[in-house]
């Protein structure tokens, strides 16, 4: 009976060790699964970003192909991006300077017009008094 009791205690200890080992294994595997799920989510996000990049590249390519003939017609040739930017900036500056000159001319004309109207009003007032 004592031998049988010791045998059952040893068996219970062995079952306890196995149970502890299995719980440790399950915890470790659960952690690995969580890590793999996180990596999988990251892969899905990366795939989505790559797909959006391909779509944006395709869209940009189609827009370049759409605008290229218009730019070539306007500029006479298709310049490199930096050269085109320089040329556009120079044209913009010239347009702004021309607009500034036209505004100044318009302002001077308005001032002359106001002065003429003031003199005319004074002359008409003088005529009425006479």
Image (spheres, rainbow, N blue to C red):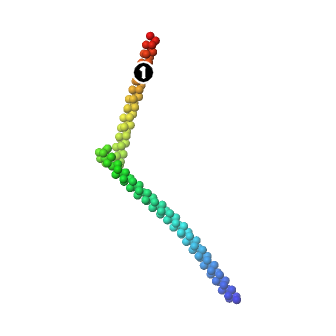
Question: 46 left or right of 76?
Answer: right
Percent x, y of residue 103: 40, 31
Question: 120 left or right of 41?
Answer: left
State the SS at label 1.
helix
Count the marks. 1
Q: Residue furthest left?
A: 76
51 relative to 93, above or below: below
Question: 44 left or right of 69?
Answer: right
| Image quarter of residue 6 | bottom right
44 relative to 12, above or below: above
Q: Quadrant of the N terminus?
A: bottom right
Residue drawn 38% across and 53% down? 60
Residue drawn 34% across and 46% down? 84
Residue annotated with mark 1: 117
Residue drawn 32% across and 44% down? 74
| Image quarter of residue 47 | bottom left
Q: Is residue 80 visible?
A: no
Callout 1 environment at 10 Å: few (<14), some (14 to 19), or many (20+)?
few
Q: Is residue 52 visible?
A: yes
As rendered, which of 121 and 46 lies closer to the eye? 121
Q: Quadrant of the C terminus?
A: top left
| Image quarter of residue 14 | bottom right
Residue drawn 29% across and 47% down? 77
Percent x, y of residue 36: 51, 67
Q: Residue furthest right?
A: 1
Percent x, y of residue 76: 29, 45
């Amino acid at each position: 009976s004592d031998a049988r009791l010791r045998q059952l205690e040893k068996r219970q200890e062995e079952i306890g060790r196995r149970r502890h080992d299995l719980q440790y294994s399950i915890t470790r595997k659960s952690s690995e699964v969580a890590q793999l799920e996180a990596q999988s989510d990251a892969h899905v996000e990366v795939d989505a970003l790559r797909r959006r990049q391909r779509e944006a590249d395709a869209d940009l390519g189609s827009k370049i192909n759409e605008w290229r003939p218009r730019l070539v017609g306007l500029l006479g040739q298709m310049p490199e991006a930096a050269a085109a930017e320089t040329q556009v900036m120079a044209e913009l500056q010239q347009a702004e300077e021309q607009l500034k000159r036209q505004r100044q001319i318009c302002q001077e004309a308005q001032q002359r017009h106001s002065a003429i109207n003031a003199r005319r009003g004074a002359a008409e007032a003088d005529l009425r008094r006479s």
